[in-house]
Image (spheres, rainbow, N blue to C red):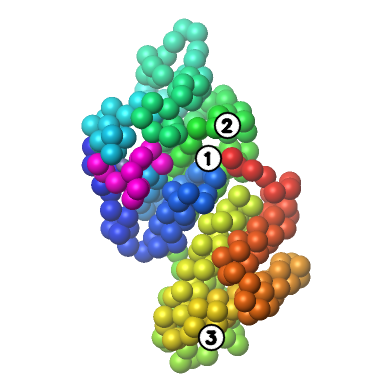
Amino acid sequence: MSPALSATDLGRLAGLDRAVRAVRALASGRSTAQSVLIYGGPATGKTTLARWLAAAWLCTGAERPCGSCPACRALASGGNPDFLLLEPKGAGGLIRLAAICPTTPPDEAYPLALRDFFRLSPLVSSCKVAVIEQAERLSPDAANALLKMLEEPQPSQRVILTAREIGWVLPTVVSRCVGVACEARRPSDDAVDALFGPFAQPERRASHEELFAQLAEWVARLPSRHPSEALVASDELQDFAERLQKAEGLNPRQARAEVLRMAAEGLRRRDGYDPQAVEAFAEAHRRVLGNVQAGLAFDSLMARVLSRLGRAAHGRPAGNSG
Ligand SMILES: [Zn+2]
């Protein structure tokens, strides 16, 4: 951990708007997520995001991370006892079992195992945060030991994993985590056409090209998202509405309704779409127009949609990643 991490400026992560929003939502008081997996290729910003989220969770100030509270200062000097960094060590380049739970004989590379770290109460912060970098390098026994801890987390436990490829991490570990993708990928024009045909008129599209592309990607990614990401997804969708509101001079209610309509249309045009998920968007659209508090309508919509789609994708009911 670099000493400057508590002051890390997320604004520097150009092109990662969605990942930055997701991490900010996770840092907010609304999220109850305890396990997060941030993944993306080399130099995509995942380490910066992981460090920022760790700092935000550990901070005891008002604007988290504040950089000036005792927890932030301890973190910056490398002495926050509520923070643990685990990474591959030694010739094999693996994160060995001893990193997760104590072994006999002890492993000098990992003087404090993750399990023992979480057994102690937080000292300066309100929670304890472990960052596990290069989680794809966890040895099989270490990954299985970690899985047990993710399945039954201590109340103050927060784990942030980073990995280059989500497919290289044990799937059962992935399924316990809220995933944050650090990839500035863009769908092709064809993908936007396919999703938003009637809504993407040429003149409208020319002025909101980025918005359309990002919303198309958001819709395309919905079926692979875990139910525990519902609040994050709700924030993201509301953010699209705010941007549309500014771009087209709509009022907030019109903009929210329009984004719901576009997302429903995009979902409906995908192969093998789920009619009930589309209906959930249509119902939220009616509720928003009917003056139901929009945040509630979006939150309950995403909880409903992700638990439906998630059941199909993850093969089990709405899980709780903590
Ligand atoms: Zn602070």
Magenta residues (range): 57-68
Q: Does the residue labelled 3 lie within 8 Å of ligand 1?
A: no
Relative to residue 223, is residue 167 drawn left or right? left
Q: Nearer the viewer, residue 227 or 106?
A: 227
* Percent of width and height locating residue 260: 60, 75
Q: Distance between the residues labelled 1 and 2?
A: 8 Å
Q: Is mark 2 within 8 Å of ligand 1?
A: no
Residue designated by label 3: 200
Which marked residue is nearer to the observer: mark 3 or mark 1?
1
Residue designated by label 1: 34
Outermost residue to the top: 105
Residue at screen point 32% across, 35% down = 71
Asked whether residue 12 appears in the rendered view, the answer is yes
Residue at screen point 50% across, 21% down = 119
Residue at screen point 50% across, 74% down = 241
Count neighbours of disc 2 (C-alpha within 10 A) and say few if under 14, some if 14 to 19, many if 20 or more. Answer: some
Residue designated by label 2: 153
Residue 177 sits above or below residue 147 on the image: below
Q: Look at the image and tell me in which quarter the C terminus lies.
A: top right
Name the amino acid, label 3: Ala
Answer whether labels 1 and 2 touch (C-beta < 8 Å).
Answer: yes
Residue 39 sits above or below residue 299 on the image: above
Which marked residue is nearer to the observer: mark 3 or mark 2?
2
Name the amino acid, label 1: Gln
* Percent of width and height locating residue 299: 60, 61
Residue at screen point 50% across, 32% down = 156
* Percent of width and height locating residue 1: 30, 35
Outermost residue to the right: 276
